[in-house]
Image (spheres, rainbow, N blue to C red):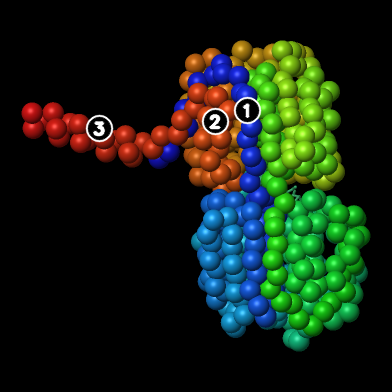
Amino acid sequence: MDKIIVRGGRRLTGTVKVEGAKNAVLPVIAASLLASEGKSTIYDVPSLADVYTINEVLRLLNAEVAFKNNMIEVDATKPLKTEAPFEYVRKMRASVLVMGPLLARVGHARVALPGGCAIGSRPIDQHLKGFEAMGATVQVGNGFLEAKVNGRLRGTKIYLDFPSVGATENIMMAAVLAEGTTIIENAAKEPEIVDLANFLNAMGAKVRGAGTGTIKIEGVNKMRGASHCVIPDRIEAGTFLIAAAITQGDVIVKGAVPEHLSALIAKMEEMGVRFEEKEDGIRVIGPEKLKAVDIKTMPYPGFPTDMQSQMMPLLLKAEGTSVITETVFENRFMHVEEFRRMNCDIKIEGRSAIITGPANLQGAEVAATDLRAAAALIIAGLVAEGYTRVVELHHLDRGYYNFTEKLASLGADIERINEDTIKKAADIANVQSNLA
Ligand SMILES: CC(=O)N[C@H]1[C@@H](OP(=O)(O)OP(=O)(O)OC[C@H]2O[C@@H](n3ccc(=O)[nH]c3=O)[C@H](O)[C@@H]2O)O[C@H](CO)[C@@H](O)[C@@H]1O
Ligand SMILES: C=C(OP(=O)(O)O)C(=O)O
């Protein structure tokens, strides 16, 4: 089992570069299934566990996928299979994003029910409502969701009860090959939606309005493979902005797009953190003293739920009481118990976490409860007294490439060790000492 060991007290300085966005590349890879002609080439693909998972799903569906040097080539021109098994959907919920493209192209998709996860129950009723409105029949049985349509899907108007990112993406991908025009109302506005629309349009689709609450998709007869460069990861960028600020550091986060991070930057500025826009990124300068602020997570352009856990250590170091209210997911405070091991005062009241600072964080053994919690606990370790040991790193590997190496390059005292390797080394040492 891998473990990250971080010793607090180092100030971060220097430059760090962000990868392509996990949450943009996963739907883009799924969308490449729509091309019945030509290959798709996707650039700036991060080397993440989730990317390997979606590649495997595509291979199971009979697409050819080659991944090398941050570039993926997908050839989906052979007849596609239509089933995504539990083994993959369980590892990564974004596997359900193959449903829209499969329904559009083949008229059938059978995907294991995603079930709940560490941040809440996460239903997909809005995705299914969209498919049904376009003429598909949806059935649930034996742990699978099955959607079918005779002939083509039909364009229609779909109002989402909540601007769900996944539902907007799945419905957009289903609608590009539908007969007539689909209008998604109360659509998600995240930059990842715009990125997906750009890729779909490069493939021959007619998608307008992505990035606003109303997206119009005029169905076309055929999609062909296209080239696409994935947008930079705003959540990875935000994670480094916080890591630098908490250590009173001075760091340039290369590739960070200021407009994608405005809610986070505004809150951090309120706390006393300084920013400078650079040609290809953002410079962040952490202050000696941080001020408490209140945060409410919201769909984009509101404060991102994916940055909520990482803000917790920053707020723990601020003077006064801060409140984080989580409105997007019903249960995204699992990491609070782990923070409590590090000597801090956080109370949970309903959907809010009440944080009293400044905390004198102490190093401890902690376990990541989800992807962003893993990063948050490591950030806390950067300013804790002594050593913090973080386990359950498979969560981290889903969304951060070389996180330890990148922090170490900025001056953090951090290393990742593999306990199996250490155990093997100890066994060899024992054998050698017995032989001596
Ligand atoms: C791979 C990916 O891009 N993941 C992101 C995506 O997840 P994901 O696409 O799953 O998030 P959604 O926007 O769909 O979910 C937001 C909320 O809506 C609810 N909901 C969603 C769909 C549905 O049919 N019914 C329903 O009730 C969910 O349970 C959740 O409470 O957006 C989230 C919100 O910004 C981010 O935290 C995730 O990192
Ligand atoms: C919650 C996240 O991802 P997913 O939707 O893939 O679980 C995330 O990226 O923080």
Q: Are marks 1 and 2 in contact (CB under 8 Å)?
A: yes
Quote the CA–CA distance across marks 2 and 3.
Answer: 29 Å
Name the disc covering residue 409, or none: 2
Q: Residue furthest bottom?
A: 151
Which three-letter amino acid code belongs to the residue tagged 1? Answer: Gly
Tell me what residue is drawn at x 67 percent, y 18 percent.
248
Q: Residue furthest front?
A: 279
| Residue 15 position within the rendered picture, expressed as x and y whole percent measured from the top left | 64, 32
Secondary structure state at the residue bearing disc 2: helix
Q: Is residue 282 above or below residue 218?
A: above
Which three-letter amino acid code belongs to the residue tagged 2? Answer: Ser
Q: Foreground: 218 or 104?
A: 218
Q: Is residue 63 above or below residue 18?
A: below
Label 1 lies in ligand 2 vicinity (Cβ under 8 Å): no
| Residue 201 position within the rendered picture, expressed as x and y whole percent measured from the top left | 80, 68
Q: Which residue is mark 3?
A: 426
Secondary structure state at the residue bearing disc 1: strand
Tell me what residue is drawn at x 80 percent, y 50 percent.
190
Camera-near label (2 vs 3) is: 2
Which of the two labelled residues, at mark 2 and mark 3, occupies the earlier sequence position?
A: 2
Tell me what residue is drawn at x 77 percent, y 38 percent.
279
Q: Is residue 343 above or below residue 377?
A: above
Left or right, 66 with respect to 288, comes to left
Which three-letter amino acid code belongs to the residue tagged 3? Answer: Ala
Which of the two labelled residues, at mark 1 and mark 3, occupies the earlier sequence position?
A: 1
Quote the CA–CA distance across marks 1 and 3.
Answer: 36 Å
Q: Are marks 1 and 3 in contact (CB under 8 Å)?
A: no
Q: Which residue is mark 1?
A: 14
The picture quadrant where one finds residue 139 is bottom right
